[in-house]
Every structure is written in structure tokens, then in C-alpha cells.
Image (cartoon, rainbow, N blue to C red):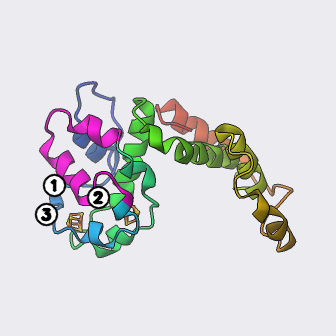
Amino acid sequence: MHEITQPNTSESLKSKLERLTDVDVSTCYQCGKCTAGCPLNEEMDIKPNQILRMLQLEYPGYEDKILSSLTIWLCLACEQCYSRCPQEVKLPKVMDFLRQESLRLHKVNPKAKDILAFHESFLDEVNRNGKMNEVGLTIEYKLRTLNLMQDVENAPSMLMKGKLGIIPHKVQHPAEIKRLFNKIKGKGGQQ
Ligand code: SF4
Ligand code: SF4
């Protein structure tokens, strides 16, 4: 586990990533197995192995390209890449870090607007109840995106099958979850 030290404003993206996660970007030797197995690879503007190569090279302008890419928001954290990687590079963790940096530096790709709305609605829901509630998440997502009628025809059958929990269930100690969220916010992370 890397120790969190005082942030250095001139620190490179790669260096910060390696300091705050346990990922060593330099171990990637570009075999491409991660990208070949990624279910979203066709939709991504920068392929997962290319993200790692750009981090390794640290050319001027690459950090902006990475942080404003659609790729980091399309990543599902499914871990297919990690399971295939001969070097055990934790790409999902890299993507997670890059999303947080992208948010912090206001570099989110405009095409990721709805994905970001979902991401924030999900975290708000967990912050409120300590766990996810489908109805709360759906309402918040729709209010954020104004996609009010999207998939609305599926609601009755989902309700009938008990797939939508109307009354949110809380975890036993929701205050503990709030404390975690506040701690992360205090360290400059997004909610
Ligand atoms: S599978 Fe691993 S070593 Fe190969 S390109 Fe992807 S991250 Fe790099
Ligand atoms: S974790 Fe992300 S990058 Fe890796 S295979 Fe899944 S979607 Fe692709």
C-alpha cells in the first residue's frame, strides 16, 4: 500500500497514479491482451493498452488526452483485462484513478455526461443509505439527465418481479458510510 503524502503540484499523472495506487505502469509491455479481451474496446477512443503506453511515455499533451478520453468513463471495471494480463497490471484501478482525476480537473469528456450523471447518482444513493436503492438511483439519474421517459415502459414489469425496491434499505451503520465519504472528500476526492 502506497502512503498518501502531500500532493506535489508539478507531479506527473503517472507518478501520482503510482503513488496513490499500487499499480506500476512501467511493467506493462504492450502485449495488447487487455484490449483484445475488453468488451468495450470497440467503443473506446483510446484503447486500454494505449492508455498505459501514453502514461509510460509522459509526452506533453498526453495527460490531457487521457483525462478527457471517453475510455475512462466507458470502462465497466469488469476486470477482464486484469485477468488476462501476464504482468498483472490492475487496469480497472488505473481507470478508477483516472476518472477521479478527470473529475477533479474538470476534464470530463462531454460525451460522458450521462455516464457521469449515473456515477454521481449511484454514489449519492450509497452515501444516503449505505447501499444502492434502484428507485432512488433511477429518480436521481433522470432528474440529472432529464431523460425522464427513458426505459419507463420497463418499470411496471420490473416492479411486478420485485426488481425495483421502492423503500430503501439502509445498512446497519449508515453514519460510518457517510464518514468514509467525508474522509475521501477531505482528501480532495469526488463524492
Ligand atoms: S495485458 Fe497487461 S502487459 Fe499486456 S498490454 Fe495489457 S496491461 Fe500491458
Ligand atoms: S475493466 Fe475496463 S478496461 Fe478492463 S476489460 Fe473491463 S471494461 Fe475493459
Query: Closer to the camera: disc 3 or disc 2?
Result: 2
| Ligand 1 contact, mark 3 (Cβ < 8 Å) | yes
In this view, 160 is above or below 134: below
Marks 3 and 2 in Cβ contact (< 8 Å): no
Residue labelled with disc 1: 26
Q: Amino acid at mark 3?
A: Tyr
Q: Is residue 21 visible in this depiction of the protein?
A: yes
For label 1, the crowd category at 10 Å Cα-Cα, with few meaning under 14, some 14 to 19 and many 20 or more, is some
Which stretch is magenta?
43-68
Q: Amino acid at mark 1?
A: Ser
| Ligand 2 contact, mark 2 (Cβ < 8 Å) | yes
Q: Looking at this view, name the residue that lies furthest to the top.
A: 9
Residue 62's tag is none
Residue 29's tag is 3
Q: Where's the C terminus, which quadrant? A: top right
Q: Is residue 4 left or right of residue 24?
A: right
Residue drawn 42% across the image and 44% down it: 99
Nearer-the-camera pick, 149 or 6: 149
Give the percent coordinates (x, y) of residue 5. 33, 34
Query: Closer to the camera: disc 3 or disc 1?
Result: 3
**Looking at the rendering, which quadrant does residue 86 occupy?**
bottom left
Give the percent coordinates (x, y) of residue 148. 74, 45
Residue labelled with disc 2: 48
Marks 2 and 1 in Cβ contact (< 8 Å): no
Q: Amino acid at mark 2?
A: Pro
Say whether disc 3 or disc 2 marks the residue closer to the N-terminus: 3
Nearer-the-camera pick, 60 or 14: 60
